[in-house]
Amino acid sequence: MPVDLKKFNYKISIALLLLILNNYLLISIGFFNIVLKINIILFFLTVAFFYFKNFKNNLTLKIYFLLILLICLGTAAKGWDLRSLYLFHAKRIFFDQSIYSVADNYAAFSHNDYPQLLNAFSASFAFLIGYWHEVFPKSAYSFIYLPPLIFLSVSLPRKKYIIFLSLIIFFLGSHLYDGGIDGAVALYFVTTAYCFYKIFFQRHSENVNFLYIITFMFGLTLSLIKNEGFALLLLIFGSTALIKLFERDFTNNLKNIFSLFLCVIPFILWKIFCFKNGIVNTDFTLTLLKENLFGRLVLFDNYKLFIEYIFISNEKSIIALLIFSISFYINFDKRMFNFVSLLFLSYLAILLIVYFSTPYDFDYHLRTSAHRVLESLTLLLGFFCLYNLNLKSLKETS
């Protein structure tokens, strides 16, 4: 990719991220007024600038996202999570003009403890047009894909990037356009993991300060999308720190890791607000951990069910593991393999704890959600498979 185009894509992705985060900040401090509308208008103008500034550049991505957006606008808002969680909260924010109305813990089943960044972004779409119509707020959950898609376009050559876009369709499916948040979690997780790998495990030509800023912003956004996003961010920090510890290079990187870790502050502040107002996640508590986890751990059939739903009956997991294995058989990059494998295994361990402690029927919970929560893992393996092969190509041509 030409240097000028690379810089352009970097600048566009950081501008869009800034406007998304600023949207959340404005609503958080009560600026539900003309300032908020200006911010959203600037967001759309930035998207338009990306599209029409040298139209032929990034053409594949532009067509790809336009198709996603058209499908999103042309399909009904359906599905339990979308209607009862995300659009429900976006609608409350729009009518109450506040993200803090959840303090009444109305409709506790709707996970009032979830971070509100995307719901606030969705509500601002309705605020811009002046009334609530769920089609336009629903499209916000597709626009959120643009910053990581643009940023990652720089990481791979054109043909491999097209393959990556195809893998996104395969692994995320309808979550690209149906208003689901799990697809956004997966894409921001992969992008944040890639940024961490670039900073801590690979020599790079990018401006160091810029790379830290964009990594901080992607990490911040990931933590504010969903509780699972925060957990995935912690896994990235933990995996990075652990590998650096084994490499005896932890002390030299402690300052950098800590400075990036500050991106979790907004999430922590949100959780403090929830705790003070008695808003808790009833799906995962210490009581359930004691009652369900330890009882299920001793039953061998539970492990069989877990493996079946995570791997055996999930063809996407099998394919992701297969292409990842082939990639690293062709080109074994030890540091990349250790980083991705540690993320993969630690996330599986978290999933095992969550499912074994669930208050729901064990089989039912796995059957209805395993395919969704695995999107982050399969996309991680798919991206680093391609990135690893690209490094091999670069070595051969240098």
Image (cartoon, rainbow, N blue to C red):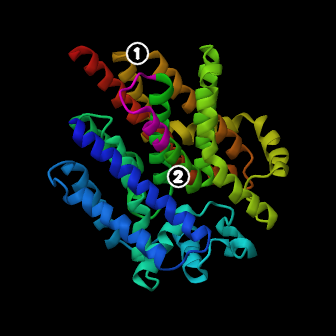
Quarter assignment of residue 114: bottom right
Residue 267 visible within the image: yes
Q: Answer yes or no: do the residues labelled 2 and 1 have beta carbons within 8 Å?
A: no
**Residue 12's spot in the image, x, y percent?**
33, 52
Q: Nearer the viewer, residue 94 or 351?
A: 94
Q: Residue at x 24, y 55 (%)?
A: 62
**Residue 269's spot in the image, x, y percent?**
70, 56
Q: Amino acid at mark 2?
A: Thr
Quarter assignment of residue 344: top right
Q: CA distance from mark 2 to mark 1?
A: 32 Å
Quarter assignment of residue 194: top left
Q: Residue at x 62, y 75 (%)?
A: 98
**Tag 1 residue:** 332
Q: Secondary structure at mark 2?
A: helix
Residue 280 visible within the image: no
**Residue 193's spot in the image, x, y percent?**
49, 36
Q: Is residue 69 magenta?
A: no
Q: Nearer the viewer, residue 215 or 323?
A: 215
Label placed on residue 221: 2
Which region is colored magenta?
202-214
Q: Secondary structure at mark 1?
A: loop
Mark 2 or mark 1, which is nearer to you?
2
Q: Residue at x 42, y 79 (%)?
A: 128
